Image: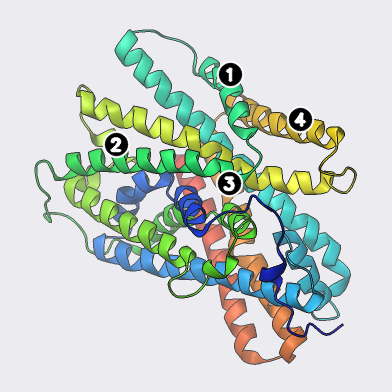
Amino acid sequence: MSSGNYDPHLHREGSNRLSSSAALVHILKAIMGSGILAMPDAMKNCGYIGGSVGTVLITVLILCCIHMLVRCSYVICKKHRVPIMSYAETVKAAVVDGPPWLRPYANCFHHLVNIFLIFAQIGICCIYVAFTAENLRKIIMSELDFHMDLRLYMLALLVPFILLCFIRNLKYLAPISMVANVLTIVGLSIVLYYIYRDGLSFEDRRAFSPISQWPLFVGTVFFTLGSIGVVVSVEYDMETPQDFGGLFGIMNIAMSIVSLLGIFIGVSGYLKYGEDIKGSVTLNFPTEEILSKSVTLVYALAIFTTYPLQAYAAIHIMCDYLKKHYKEDTNMYKIWDYSIRAAFVTVTTLLAIAVPNLALIISIMGALCMTMTGFFFPAIVEICVMYSEHGVKCGYISRDLLIILLGIIGFASGIYVAIRSISA
């Protein structure tokens, strides 16, 4: 069937779609997590000039892959005359139209994408549970001199996290994301106050660090900026998805803001503390000051309110499978929907409680999952779409193979970071 003048963007239905401003708020919060506090440590591993240039290059690469995926999804939707496809559906449809030798694996690709996306978000949410609980424990121990096992703090957060995840629509999560963004801005303001309070120094600060340390930089920056599961989910729910792409689209605006902020915080923090910089810059602050303690509270609240946004992408995928068995307006669907949400939060909480060295294990899982979803699958999609439209041409194949190679390097960097952390 000819696609004609069919425009998928004009056929998206639903009354609870996101405005462009709400989408920008969600994307900013999804990208600007606690990882930005690790940017000074990242700069230490690459140098303040090398790290700045490297952050820009990684940002451009991530943006390229996101736009590639969204653009190809639009082409596929237009070709098949459907208003919208999920990430996994896009990959499956692309492979079906791709090279003949790849077509038999279309269903396999569909399930693999969903598996990687779900595991990536589970990993992120586990970290959020642990981060929030640890920061709350620090505050309570410091102010009330009350000592309780960290695992009990995690259990205490179970019900609040479940209640937040019972908000089923991204439109109604926008105010929560706005609160999280405000808290993050307040926290970053305090961070900058401590960094600039006594001035900066270029003494013994390296413009370029040894190449052996670069993988640590790449791993930190990639996982700070990469959140493709949430970003794609936001684009799907936009009222005007045309505003997503383009030179001054919300994706470019959001990534530019976070990238420049990351460079600013990273370089400033490294120049301030040099080789003594900790994994999170807040660990360098004086622990006895009230303002320093307030950073802990602010970021605990910010990450707490961001949890449902990170969970949304994984829950949305699982609910798509549910829609194959029940209609959305039935009571049975709603029962299963809320059960899935409660189960997801419970699983991430129990994993955070049960798994020792969680951050190291998650970094390995995250390296695999985020590399696959952020680089490998978008490149495969474009290869298949370009093949169906233009046949085999060296130009796009070379570019996409380069992206796949860079993704493999990113994966190796993540594994290297984990191994170095374990050996240390």
Kind of residue at badge 1: Leu
Q: Earlier in the sequence, mark 2 or mark 4?
A: 2
Q: Are marks 4 and 3 in contact (CB under 8 Å)?
A: no
Q: Which mark is residue 339?
A: 4
At label 2, counting other C-alpha atoms closer than 10 Å, the crowd grade (few under 14, some 14-19, many 20 or more) is many
Which residue position holds label 3? 171
Nearer the camera: disc 3 or disc 1? 3
Nearer the camera: disc 4 or disc 3? 3
Nearer the camera: disc 1 or disc 2? 1
Disc 4 versus disc 3: distance between alpha carbons? 21 Å
Vertical placement of 96 versus 395: above or below? Answer: above
Kind of residue at badge 4: Ser
Q: Are marks 2 and 4 in contact (CB under 8 Å)?
A: no
Q: Secondary structure at mark 2?
A: helix
Kind of residue at badge 2: Thr
Q: Which mark is residue 282?
A: 2
On the rendered image, what quadrant is the N terminus found in?
A: bottom right
